[in-house]
Amino acid sequence: MPVKETYWEPHIELMSRKEMQFLQLKRMKHVLKYVYDRVPFYKKRFDEGKVKPSDLRRLEDLRKFPFTTKDDLRQHGVPYGILAVPRARLINFQMSSGTTGRATIYPYTRRDIELWANVMARQLVCCGVRPGDIMVNCYGYHLFTGGPGTHLGAQRLGVAVIPWGAQRTEALVEALRERRATVIAGTPSFLYHVTEVMKGVDPERDFDLRVALCGAEPWTPAMRARLNERFALRSRGGGARDYYGTSEMIGPGAGSECFVEQGIHFWTDHFYLEVVDRETGEPLPPGEEGELVFTHLSREAAPLIRFRQGDVTKVLDDGCECGRVFPRIAAIKGRADDMIIYKGAKFYPSQIEAVLLKFPEAAQEYQIVVDKTGATPLVTVRVETDRADEGLEDRVRSAFLNELLVRPEVEFVKQGDLPRFEGKAKRVVVKQ
Ligand SMILES: [Zn+2]
């Protein structure tokens, strides 16, 4: 472990696994009783499943308790239908970006906001941000969680934040230069867009950027390489790092990569982690890919029990060079619902992106159109480029075949023709 590595809460982050399990069990017993006593939805659910909070003696007993799904939340009316505190105790609301289905609103008490600031500060330190840094925050500032969560954590840590949002890209390049920003936070697609407009900038001479905080959507190793290179992050000992959390969890603040950059440490002292088989719901061992399920161990306003997040990942449970006790999960491939099935092959939009990034002349912005109006579905990848030569379409299609075992259609469009996104990029269009 490099001596320079530091921790926000070393007494927790460097615990032994046994100590962590002890802490989790104590919190889990508390939260099950807390929701059973206060939230009619959970009392009914547990009663129907014939389980009581006192049935939990070991952590593994959690699997006896029922899942909570997105449909449950919609049907029972988030935010008030699952509230565990009087409404007057709420001090904040945020919204999910509605990646799948209608957007939902989540409530926070003062203690939840404290928790959010703290887990975000932990996350920033884990990514390599330090007090005294200057951050340009390009996550959106409104009901979405990315902007406010990152802002809270940065201020808690002692980082000066420039609350920019995902807009005015050319002025942003100037701000990076003039304010000598050391950290940039935003969706990978937006940060990529920034690298597109910074013509004539020498990132080693004109910028001081060291860390890019990338979250809210799946991204690829090729995208990481490109951001590292175009912002010259490696020359200052940093890098582009993955950053995780969903609005159901708390917003960003559920975990992040460390300097090792091999998977996301998940903050399991606050968000108990399971990965389950999507069909059977059975918990899977480390190394097996399934759906991420979490249980809030310390939220106050509306804790969720065994919430099926829908994100596809696996646990990489083999310790980490940084010494943190928290297990790592593999980079999120996408929502289980985002998976595209085409001519028998299954793939995620992030895999399309990985292929396109191998083509510097075609990797600008893309959109996947799934046309289900005909007899058989047709998948077309629309790619922005101003440099399409005659053989490009064939080369891209063969690369798809190599990677995805199937060859979607390719259509080239002019640069700037596809939509840009302020929050999470919506790259799949389904025609029914
Ligand atoms: Zn680590």
Image: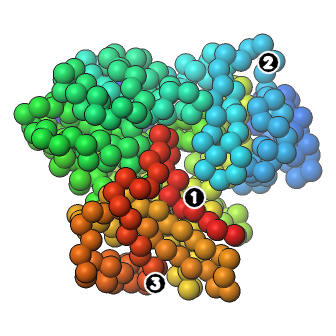
Label 3 – label 1 distance at C-alpha: 20 Å
> Residue 368 shows which numbered tag?
none
Q: First in sequence: mark 3 or mark 1?
A: 1
Residue 176 x/y as whole percent: 23, 28
Q: Secondary structure at mark 3?
A: loop
Residue holding disc 2? 87
Q: In terms of depth relative to the viewer, which is nearer, 387 or 78? A: 387
Residue holding disc 1? 335
- At horizontal 27% and vertical 22% (from top left) the residue drawn is 134
Location of residue 221 with respect to 423 vertically, above or below: below
Q: Secondary structure at mark 1?
A: loop
345 left or right of 233 in image: right
Q: First in sequence: mark 2 or mark 1?
A: 2
Residue holding disc 3? 406
Residue 207 x/y as whole percent: 15, 32
Instruction: Indicate the quadrant where residue 376 lies.
Output: bottom right
Residue 88 x/y as whole percent: 78, 13
Label 2 – label 3 distance at C-alpha: 52 Å
Numbered disc in front, either 3 or 1? 3
Q: Amino acid at mark 2?
A: Arg
Q: In terms of depth relative to the viewer, which is nearer, 183 or 46? A: 183
**Badge 2 vs badge 3, beta-carbon distance below 8 Å:** no
Residue 260 visible in the snapshot: no
> Dot 3: few (<14), some (14–19), or many (≥20) neighbours within 10 Å?
some
Q: Amino acid at mark 3?
A: Val
Residue 225 visible in the snapshot: yes
